Image (cartoon, rainbow, N blue to C red):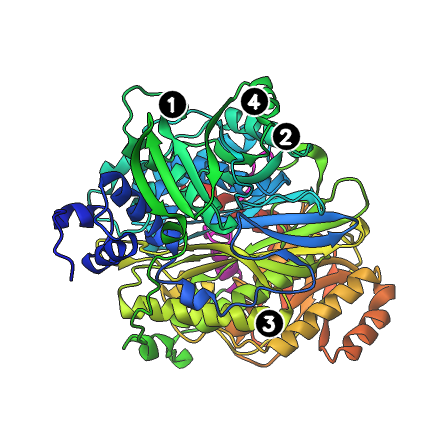
Amino acid sequence: MTVSVVAPDLIASHGLTADEYDRIVAIIGREPNLVELGMFGAMWSEHCSYKSSRVHLATLPTEGPRILQGPGENAGVLDIGDGLALVFKMESHNHPSFIEPYQGAATGVGGIIRDIFTMGARPFALCDSLRFGPLTDPKNRYLFSRVVAGIAGYGNAVGVPTVGGEAYFAEPYSGNPLVNVLCVGVARKDRLFFAKAGGIDNPVIYVGARTGRDGIHGATMASGVFDEGAEARRPTVQVGDPFREKLLIEACLELMEGDDLVAVQDMGAAGLTCATAEMASRGGTGIEIDLARVPRREPGMTAYELMLSESQERMLVVAKAGSEARVRTVFEKWDLDAAVIGHVTEGGLLRVLDHGRPVAEIPADALASEAPAYHRPSSRPAEADARQRLDLDRLPLPDDYAAVLLELLRSPNLCCKEGIWERYDHMLFLGTIVGPGSDAVVLRLPGGTRAIALSIDGNSRYCTVDPYRGAMIAVAEAARNVVCGGGEPLAITNCLNFGNPERPEIMWQFVEAVTGIGEACRAFQTPVTGGNVSLYNETSGNAIFPTPMIGMVGLLDDVAYATGQWFQAEGDLVALFGDTREELGASEYLAIRFGLVQGEPPALDLTRERAVQRTCLEAIRAGIIRSAHDCSDGGLVVALAESCLGATPIGVDIQLKDTIRPDALLFGESQSRIVVSLKATDWLRLERIAAAHQVPVTRLGIVGGTRFRLHGPACGLDLPMTEVEAAWRSGLASSLGA
């Protein structure tokens, strides 16, 4: 073992263990200086290196006929035909959003946007997934309001609309909210750009905003658990400037129209260290830079600060030799700095100078790809069996099913989220065909009659009691939602949010979830193009619910296939694809009515799920389906109520004939079910399509009137739609005390 002259507490303060430090010394053949120690600390952090997760992520399916770029670049890329490529990715900004919610959320938006246009794509839509503690707590209300304001403030100003998403509230998120953001863009298939430095002596050019002291140690902060003093880490959170980001988008895309660029990389986590190391490592080259040339906004910055700052709206590009003046001209036109700070070298060494004096010399691969990969201990927690047991006989049936429905619709997890999305400019560019609030958002692709569908899904309750099945259901529901929007599911990105991986029970949750995602993605032929792992989401030993979020993209060959979840016209028939079983485990009904997160999640048969989705999509393409809405949180009766609550609410009259337990019939969350509406004259055509796929289809009732009526063998309800709508619309406002 190395006998280090570097103080152990200094090593630990950089997030490194003694064994990791010894490994660094062995790799570079000497002890690192302070700048090098900081660089290794950032790049070998959990946030940057995925050292606890990458052995498991390697099991996911990442290839397919449409995949142009899978994991390993700034974003995933799909071939969507007509010479176009769809570029998309989802990332988290959880820890910063707890410490400083406005800037944490805002810079999360800015960072994911840069990942998209770095690839040569124009970003055109954002979706978000948010998790908070109960809004009855003032701190949670503060975090919620500031995060939503940060997303709106940055996205609206930068000109990339936030078109949809979801929000969920539960106690385990009180100490650690989650902010996951997905961005999608479109590029020409023959004009994609990658972060691979190439061409010996080609210039390395810093472009964008100037460097300050914000965000130093941001990557290591995001790789640790919180304690009571978490807010003291506020200086590690970056500060965003969306107007400068807008300029950066336009400058980069203008430069990409020419032939001067070799490689492009965002300066995100670990800042200049990450950008230089990863570009060199991917390209099999070295890079030499001189920090004296780095534009900065604060005097007296040290080499350590310059290499680790995570100031926003900055990029690093490798250009062709001789193009320096053209690059500078483009960025000066957009009022941005552009400075040649170094060049590409042979030999794979990242060499950092400061006024010509060497301050760091490290093999690029050592930083970018040689961090340890851990097979951390994993064990099923002792309480897992007890958590999955549920004795329905001990749960009393409701006396008033109408009251339960209204209670569910008022709950923060099921109520109208208009109070969130009305803050977002979701109609920017007039490309939104089906907007927020439906199962999937549908967006017109530029220059044609095709569209894409986007969905973000993940059920934290299911994953708490069974992370394997819960993660499979997340993929299935994301695909089902895309199908309900009229799209063919193509691929996913993900955000995997978990607690401390050094705890075996947390690692078990992670491994089970990744296994479930992989199995479902193989079944749906939707490969994983990349994403983000966010670990150590816990405060004072209290971990979040395991929360794997799935971002799914789908393709519509014709915008005419775009379908919303809302009933369309009086006299339409209402039908249900799939079967309803007596399943109440881990349901929203149990959580709200009994305060329980208990019981096995609903069963999932992937073969049946695929058949249901194919049936629905074929019927949509045949012009039969007028609305489609999946049954998920809250069960069948909530899905029916939500289908009534379009721009102009409309009533429905439903007859149920099942003989299972009444509350399971109404509020159970059996999978592989879709509520659809259609003209009465199309019923026989729908039956034939369903029969061809061996999918049960049940005629439930008829759309019309001003009341929500449901008749069942042992349950029933009859409510005016005004009361249903009022309950649904009041939930978020009442939770916020408005």
- Residue visible at 66% across and 54% down in the picture: 78
- Relative to residue 649, is residue 476 drawn left or right? left
**Alpha carbon separation for disc pair 3 and 2:** 38 Å
**Residue, disc 4:** 328
**Residues packed near mark 1 inside 10 Å, few (<14), some (14 to 19) or many (20 plus):** some
Residue 597 in sight here: no
- Residue visible at 49% across and 60% down in the picture: 458
Type of amino acid under label 3: Arg
Type of amino acid under label 2: Leu
Q: Nearer the viewer, residue 178 or 132?
A: 178
> Residue 570, labelled with which disc?
none
User: Circle 2 — which element?
Assistant: helix
Q: In the image, which is nearer the foreground, mark 3 or mark 2?
A: 2
> Residue 255, labelled with which disc?
2
Q: Earlier in the sequence, mark 1 or mark 3?
A: 1
**Residues packed near mark 2 inside 10 Å, few (<14), some (14 to 19) or many (20 plus):** some
**Alpha carbon separation for disc pair 1 and 3:** 47 Å
Q: Earlier in the sequence, mark 3 or mark 4?
A: 4
Q: Earlier in the sequence, mark 2 or mark 4?
A: 2
Residue 286: x percent and y percent?
A: 44, 44
- Relative to residue 359, is residue 280 drawn left or right? right
Q: Earlier in the sequence, mark 1 or mark 2?
A: 2
Q: Nearer the viewer, residue 90 or 736?
A: 90
Tell me the quarter of the picture where residue 361 sits: top left
Q: Nearer the viewer, residue 455 or 570?
A: 455
Give the magenta-colored segment's residue range. 401-425
Type of amino acid under label 1: Arg
**Alpha carbon separation for disc pair 3 and 4:** 46 Å
**Residue, disc 3:** 522
Q: Nearer the viewer, residue 561 or 302?
A: 302
User: Circle 3 — which element?
Assistant: helix
**Residue, disc 1:** 296
